[in-house]
Amino acid sequence: MFNKNFFFRKKFLLFNLFFGIYIFTNLVGGERGIISYFEKKQITMALEKKEIQLINEINKLEKKNELLSEKMNLDYLDTLYREKLNYGLKDEKIIRLK
């Protein structure tokens, strides 16, 4: 059986054992562990892809805004006018391609 003398003699061993278990569980799990690292890495990659997608969308909108504001591009206006209002001239055949 265990008695007090065993614990006093082996307290350094027990301390190292518990400390090692504590370090290992925090290394694998926990908020800063390996599993959490890979989860955060996946979230970061997804956010970077979303950022690139949003930057491309902003660039497209800036180009469209530039066509409408600084130098009026009449061809682009005509395209918007026909597309949004379903407008066409007489004797004109409109073919929509999707």
Image (spheres, rainbow, N blue to C red):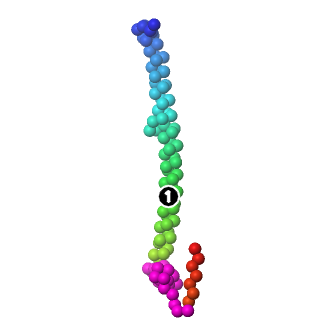
Query: Could you tell me which residue is drawn at 56 percent across and 84 percent down?
Result: 94
Q: Is residue 6 above or below residue 39?
A: above
Which x, y percent locates residue 54?
48, 62
Three-letter amino acid code at the position of disc 1: Lys
Tell me if I can see residue 10 in this picture: yes
Frontmost residue, 98 versus 28? 98
Q: Residue furthest left?
A: 4
Query: Could you tell me which residue is drawn at 48 percent across and 82 percent down?
Result: 86
Q: How many numbered marks are there?
A: 1
Q: Quadrant of the N terminus?
A: top left
Q: What residue span does the magenta drawing correspond to?
A: 67-91
Q: Is residue 69 above or below residue 32?
A: below
Element at label 1: helix
Which x, y percent locates residue 82?
49, 83
Q: Is residue 85 magenta?
A: yes
Query: Could you tell me which residue is drawn at 47 percent across and 79 percent down?
Result: 84
Which x, y percent locates residue 51?
49, 59
Query: Could you tell me which residue is drawn at 49 percent across and 58 percent down?
Result: 50
Tell me if I can see residue 74 in this picture: no
Q: Which residue is mark 1?
A: 50
Q: Quadrant of the C terminus?
A: bottom right
Q: Determine crowd level at label 1: few under 14, some 14-19, many 20+ residues with C-alpha closer than 10 A.
A: few
Q: Is residue 92 above or below residue 31?
A: below
Q: What secondary structure is the magenta-colored segment mainly?
A: helix
Which x, y percent locates residue 87?
48, 85
